[in-house]
């Protein structure tokens, strides 16, 4: 009897959850629809690289930072390296355009520091999120 009640309760809960409304943006918010405007890559010194990115439709600085991180990861792979370490990122918004100016070091071995990225894993994650790379 207890099993039948549990099964019936789960079926009822599943049926009710199917009726739940799907989340929609709050009033005044728009759905996330980024438009990636491009990446400029500047080799500063040996393993130090500057990435300048631009986009519209960003929700916040984090979206711009993610775009620059994806660029750095792909650049590291193109150069035959497997890792990158974040040095700094500045973000500015002018009208609808968000710009990021990021600096990373690239290396074959896992660099010291807390903000390191595995380039292969990051590029794969960027692809899954629809964020373009270099």
Image: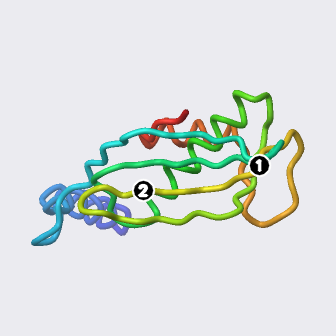
Between 55 and 94, the one nearer to me in the picture = 94
Relative to residue 120, is residue 82 drawn left or right? right
Q: Is residue 66 above or below residue 42?
A: below
- What residue is at 30 percent from the left and 63 percent from the top? 94
- Out of 90 and 114, give the one closest to the viewer: 90
Report the front residue among 28 and 80.
80
Q: Residue at x 36, y 58 (%)?
A: 98
Which residue is pictured at 64% across the width and 42% down the height? Answer: 42
> Mark 2–mark 1 contact, CB under 8 Å?
no
> Of marks 2 and 1, which one's residue comes earlier in the chain?
1
In the picture provided, is 123 more to the left or to the right than 99? right
Identify the residue shown where x is 71% and y is 51%: 117
Q: Quadrant of the C terminus?
A: top right
Q: Position of residue 26 (x, y in %)?
A: 15, 71
Location of residue 97 in the rendering, given as x and y in whole percent from the top left corner: 31, 55
Residue tagged 1: 48
User: Circle 2 sits in a helix, a strand or a loop, which is it?
Assistant: strand
| Residue 85: mark | none
Q: Is residue 115 left or right of residue 97?
A: right
Query: Are there few (<14), some (14-19), or many (20+) residues within 10 Å of tag 1?
Result: some
Vertical comparison of 85 with 71: above or below: below
The one nearer the camera, 38 or 109, is 38
Res 99 quadrant in image: bottom left
Residue 66 coordinates in the image, percent (x, y): 51, 54
Q: What SS does tag 1 mark?
A: strand
Which quarter of the rendered picture does the N terminus lie within? Answer: bottom left
Count all numbered tags in the image, as a single digit.
2
- Residue 96 lies, with reference to residue 46, above or below; the image says below
Q: Which residue is mark 2?
A: 99
Q: CA distance from mark 2 to mark 1?
A: 20 Å
């Amino acid at each position: 009897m207890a099993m039948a009640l549990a099964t019936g309760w789960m079926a009822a809960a599943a049926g009710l959850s199917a009726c739940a409304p799907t989340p929609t943006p709050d009033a005044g918010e728009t759905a996330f629809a980024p438009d990636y405007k491009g990446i400029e890559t500047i080799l500063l010194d040996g393993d130090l690289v500057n990435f300048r990115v631009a986009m519209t439709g960003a929700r916040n600085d984090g979206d711009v930072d993610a775009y620059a991180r994806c660029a750095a990861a792909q650049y590291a792979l193109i150069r035959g390296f497997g890792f990158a370490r974040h040095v700094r990122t500045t973000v500015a918004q002018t009208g609808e355009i968000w710009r990021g100016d990021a600096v990373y070091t690239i290396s074959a071995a896992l660099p010291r520091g807390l903000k390191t990225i595995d380039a292969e894993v990051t590029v794969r994650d960027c692809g899954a999120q629809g964020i373009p790379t270099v």
